[in-house]
Amino acid sequence: MSVSSALASRLKDPSLLVDTALIADRWVGRSKTGETFEVTNPATGEVLAVLPDMGRAETADAIEAAHAAQKAWAARTGKERAGVLRRFYDLIVAHADDLAIILTSEMGKPLAEAKGEVLYGASYVEWFAEEAKRIYGDTIPGHQPDKRIIVLKQPVGVVASITPWNFPNAMLARKLAPALAAGCAMVSKPAAETPLSALALAVLARRAGLAPGLFNIVLSTDSASIGQEMCANSKVRKLTFTGSTNVGKILMRQGADQVLKLGLELGGNAPFIVFDDADLDAAVEGAMVSKFRNNGQTCVCANRLYVQSGIYDAFAARLTERVAQLKIGNGFEEGVQAGPLISSKALSKVEEHISDALAQGATVSTGGNRDGRGDLFFQPTVLTDVTSSMKVAREETFGPVAPLFRFETEEEVIELANDTEFGLASYFYAKDLSKVFRVAEALEYGMVGINTGLISTEVAPFGGIKQSGQGREGSKYGIEDYLEIKYLCLSI
Ligand SMILES: NC(=O)c1ccc[n+]([C@@H]2O[C@H](COP(=O)([O-])OP(=O)(O)OC[C@H]3O[C@@H](n4cnc5c(N)ncnc54)[C@H](O)[C@@H]3O)[C@@H](O)[C@H]2O)c1
Ligand SMILES: O=C[C@H](O)CS(=O)(=O)O
């Protein structure tokens, strides 16, 4: 197929820019149907690559390759697996600038954010390189004098993964690292909007010494068919998915026939609560990073900002002032803080949420319109006088819109914050220690940021409850999702 020579010329190592899928030790440039698809830069519309558009047949080939390679990988010691992962980590860090350029080109986020994502993804590889050596079992006192009980932890086997466009590097690294550390093999389908970051990681994984078949990448715009193969193929032991709740439900239904083990990192609707006793400046800065990181296109973004009445006007004024200062533009421009949205569909959802809110009485205090820099640019926006009847309260906006809701009491805001089918991230700012514990324990979410708007780290268990998913990624808990427990009962 083909890659952009302009993009390749920006890279120190152009070999990271790949236009082929990876199945076993073959870089596959042509799909079985000959179909192709384009990857474009959302800021400029430039075609970055033309890739093979694959289907179930290629997915089955990749699963076969993973199945053939996995047992030998599982038979290696944890220390040996750790060594390969450590080399992989070192290569990612050494090539972080190139990986960031590829990421910004295909996804649009500012280059500094892209570099941050690459290093964040690398932190999971580093973490699970260490965890690979600490997959401990148990011995249990026998239930009878002649019985001895041992608990083993063994890799689940072949893992399928499907990842989204908003963090095309880190969302894959956060799955690949624990899977490999545990002794699994992976077949990955990245989002068709942003596959180049995944392919660059595959180049570095092979360079780190990862054997053919342990990490396969299938490229496709027909994600439904790829997912059907991943769910139906009996050689797949686990499917790990990051994306929308609706797709997560489809995969759950499809996987039911073989009781497929699932890891689901799904949608969010994060409340961001500011109490009267909050540090106002800190709360504004926390709202900026929680709401506008990645241009509001993250699953843990503040989606609803609840501000107690005593501080509402001051917070609204300060936040409006800060948001109005955000620099919009191409992610490669110096100082840009807000790039394009990923698609016209995403931009339409932002406009729909704003128009619905205005129609019900909300007010725009800054932004609210498309930006003239290009078809996918939208002004960072603050809405005031927002109420629970509006779409921004019930749906994930996934864009640069900060809707401010007023509340009076702690009891009221807990009820408002929990009134959603989602349960991923939540945030609140307060100083009173008793209140901090009361609110943290009452919020029905997998993650709670307290006096901070940035909670994502490899050392902590990332994940949600309710319809935000199941399982955890990162931390000492993250590798468990890639292991099976086996218990041995010995009679002596
Ligand atoms: N919880 C998390 O860690 C996390 C992280 C990032 C994004 N998300 C969520 O993802 C959503 C935004 O990402 P998106 O728009 O790419 O989500 P999406 O669900 O539309 O797509 C995610 C991935 O699933 C694939 N996909 C789509 N339909 C499929 C199907 N029927 N079968 C199999 N695969 C299918 C897509 O090609 C993509 O690779 C938001 O809801 C966001 O909250 C969650
Ligand atoms: O979109 C959600 C990702 O998980 C982003 S992050 O982990 O918070 O960086």
Image: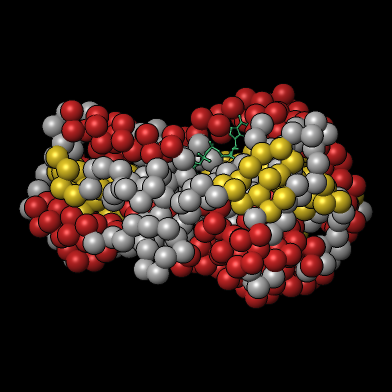
Query: Can see residue 203?
Result: yes
Residue 413 percent location from the top left of the image: 21, 43
Query: Can see residue 443?
Result: no
Query: What colouring style does the render use?
Result: secondary structure
**From what the image shows, is residue 360 above or below residue 322?**
above
Residue 318 percent location from the top left of the image: 15, 60
Quadrant in the picture for the C terminus: bottom right
Quadrant of ligand 1: it is top right
Residue 66 percent location from the top left of the image: 83, 47
Q: In the image shown, does 318 or 68 lie closer to the viewer?
A: 318
Residue 176 percent location from the top left of the image: 68, 55
Q: How many marks?
A: 0
Q: In the image shown, does 17 or 206 lie closer to the viewer?
A: 17
Q: Would residue 394 be found to the left or right of residue 252 on screen?
A: left
**From what the image shows, is residue 61 above or below residue 382?**
above
- Residue at the spot x=44%, y=60% of the render? 331
Q: Would residue 225 be found to the left or right of residue 283 on screen?
A: right
Q: In the image shown, does 149 or 355 lie closer to the viewer?
A: 355
- Residue at the spot x=51%, y=47% of the render? 45
- Residue at the spot x=72%, y=68% of the render? 88
**From what the image shows, is residue 16 above or below residue 444?**
below
Q: Picture quarter containing residue 74?
A: bottom right
**From what the image shows, is residue 478 above or below residue 415?**
below
- Residue at the spot x=56%, y=64% of the render? 101
